[in-house]
Amino acid sequence: MPLHNFYKNDSQNNLPAKNMTQNISMAVYILQFISIFTGGLFSLVPLFVTYIFRHQAKETWLDNHFRWQIQTFWFGTLFYSFAWLFGLIPFIGWIFSIPLFILASAIVVFRSIRGWKRLNIQKSPQNLLE
């Protein structure tokens, strides 16, 4: 088989292409988790990677993981933004800013770990009943 056809995702039983997409999704979960230690500034890298490689997972179980990762970014960004806004208000704003920052970090951690675990057993991260 020619090398250029080895990574094509034309059929359902083309395992190298699926494994590559699964590895990319795994790397995005790791990058999202690491991004909490940068205050969310590093979170654009996993978002770009997700958008670049999402088309390879269309109509597969991995598509749910890419959607989950994009939602994780936007939920985290929403709460980090509120935390920064409240942080600009002296004293009273800081009372709200610190819990919101902790909540944003907890959301990213929870969703990254949950997605990682579900990816390892090849299940969708969004079905909470399984």
Image (cartoon, rainbow, N blue to C red):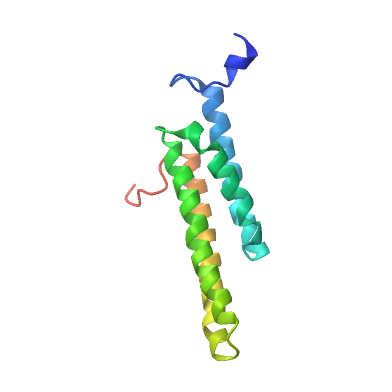
Measured from the top left, where is residue 34 in percent x and y? 64, 56
In this view, 110 is above or below 89 = above
Q: Position of residue 62 (x, y in %)?
A: 46, 37
| Quadrant for the N terminus in the image | top right
Q: Quick one: 111 or 56, which is closer to the camera?
A: 56
Residue ID at (59%, 81%): 87
Q: Quadrant of residue 3?
A: top right
In this orientation, which residue lies closer to the viewer: 120 or 61? 61
Relative to residue 68, is residue 9 depicted above or below?
A: above
Q: Position of residue 93 (x, y in %)?
A: 54, 86
Outermost residue toward the bottom in this view: 91
Residue 112 or residue 74, whichever sits in front: 74
The outermost residue toward the left is 129
- From where the camera sits, is residue 122 visible? no
Residue 127 showing in the rendered view: yes
**Residue located at (47% from left, 61% from top):** 75
Residue plotted at (52% across, 53% down): 113
What residue is rendered at 50% in x and 69% in y? 79
Can you give x and y, in whole percent of width and height, for residue 38 in the image?
Answer: 67, 63
Outermost residue on the top side: it is: 1
